[in-house]
Structures are given as C-alpha cells and as structure tokens.
Amino acid sequence: MVYGLKLGGCLQMDDFEWSKAKYFIIYVLSFTIGTYTNIMVLSMANVETVIVFRSFTPIAVAFFDCLFYNRAAPSMRSCLSLLLITLGAIAYIITDREFQANGFAAYTWVMIWWFVLIFQLTYGKFLVTGIELISLWTPVLYTNMFSIIPAMLVCYFAGELNPERLDDLQLTNASVLWLSISCVIGIGISWAGFWCQSLVSATKYTVVGVMNKMLTVMLNVLIWDKHASPAGIFALGLCLIGGSLY
C-alpha cells in the first residue's frame, strides 16, 4: 500500500537502497525475535510479568541514550519519575494479583525479550536520526516490506497454513473490511511511531510506550473489572503520575 502510494506520486520516500535498507533489516530481525519471545513469555507467565519488565526499560534505555546519543544524564526529577513508574508497576503486581510464573523458563524468555526490546528502542532512534532519509515513510516501507519474510516463517512454523485451519477460514465481506481497516491503522501506527522517535529521545519514547500500556490497563480495570482493589488502582496512578512528571 505504501509503495503503491509512492508510485502514484502521493508519498515521497527512498527507493530500496542497500546502503540504507541494511540497517532496517537488523531492526526487523530484532522486532521478530522480540515478538516471538513475547509470545513465549505470555505462554508461560502472566501479563503482569510483562508489565513489570516493560516498566524497567526506560531506566536501561536512559543509560544507552547517554552512551550512544550524547544525551545529558537524567536529572534528579527524571530519575525519580522513572523510579516512580517502576515502583508503581511492582506495586500493581503485588496488590492486584499474585506475581507468579511457570518456573525458571518464564524468566529466561522474559529476560531475552527485555534485552531485545532495549536494543530495539535504542536502535530505533538511530534509524530516524542517524540515516539521511527523504521522509519518515521510508522506515515504514522498509520495516513492513522486510517483515513479510519473517512473518511468513512464523506463520508456517506456528501451523497457520495447515489445511485444517485454512478450511475453517471464512473470508466474509465484514471480515475483509475489518482486516483492511486494521492494516490501515497499522500503517498509521508505524508512521506515528517513527515520527515520535524522530522528535524525542529514546528514553522519552520508551516512557510513552510504558504509559500507554498503563493507561490501557487502568481503563480496563475501571471499566471492566468490578473487583479491582483500590490499592491496585492507586499503584497504576503512581505509574501515570511518574510518566507525567517525566
């Protein structure tokens, strides 16, 4: 879709140049590994495990921000804000649900996922600031195009192409419509993500990622979970306050 808009003269972006595209192949590989490990984590542990480890990423990314992008060290207020986000996430786990995982294997996968995520968030800043690009539609084109091969491999090994599953597939007008809408939204998310990364530091972008997860959880708690504890809501509030202060 993006390349078609380029050919039609609606969007401007780079062609497939190896000097630029090679950097995005690394990004796509890390994204694929991150997606797979995230699935493995969720198959062995609970969602709260992911939330806690995701909340630790801004502190780590802040270190690499200073190391690779010559960013100033976080101020005392920024450090306290990042700490408040982390403490709020941990408090949510402790007060709202038991923090349980299925043995050591769950933590093995979540640690791999955590390191890959930190690399991805730090490296993503380089893609939009360290490479001369015609527009931010170039990263959208490269990442989505290069993701087709690993996505098909995951599809194959996950058994999505088994005849039994394909026989149950129903391509109704409504399903095709919603699938198309989700693809358009996905392209918008891809562009907005790179746009945001180009404007702010890797740490701030990571904080935004944590905050939207916390806001989603809080809305779910307030709207759907009739038995959410006041302590759990307070803990999520701490996370949102920490993100706002940062």
Image (cartoon, rainbow, N blue to C red):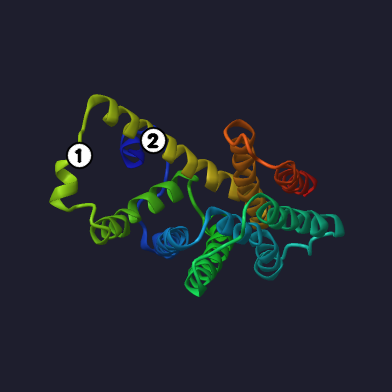
> Disc 1 marks which residue?
169
Picture disc at residue 214? none
* Viewer-proximal residue among 8 and 79: 79
State the residue at coordinates (60%, 46%).
Answer: 213
* Residue kind at label 2, given as amino acid type: Ser
Q: Is residue 198 left or right of residue 186?
A: right
- Residue at image position (24%, 52%) is 160
Residue 21 at x, y percent in the picture: 40, 60
13 on left or right of 129:
left
SS at mark 2 in the image: helix
Please give the label number shown on residue 182: 2
Q: Secondary structure at mark 1?
A: loop
- Give neighbour class at mark 2: few <14, some 14-19, many 20+ (Cα, 10 Å): few
Q: Amino acid at mark 1?
A: Leu
Q: Nearer the viewer, mark 1 or mark 2?
A: 1
Closer to us: 168 or 176: 168
Quarter of the image where one finds residue 1: top left
Whole-percent x, y for residue 188 in the image:
47, 37
Looking at the image, can residue 23 be seen?
no
Cα gap from disc 1 to disc 2, whole angstroms: 18 Å
Of all residues, the one furthest to the front in this rendering is 227
Q: x, y percentage for residue 180?
A: 33, 32
**Residue 61 appears in view:** yes
Q: Residue at x 27, y 31 (%)?
A: 176
User: Mark 1 Cα within 10 Å, few/some/many (few <14, many 20+)?
Assistant: few
Tally of numbered tags: 2
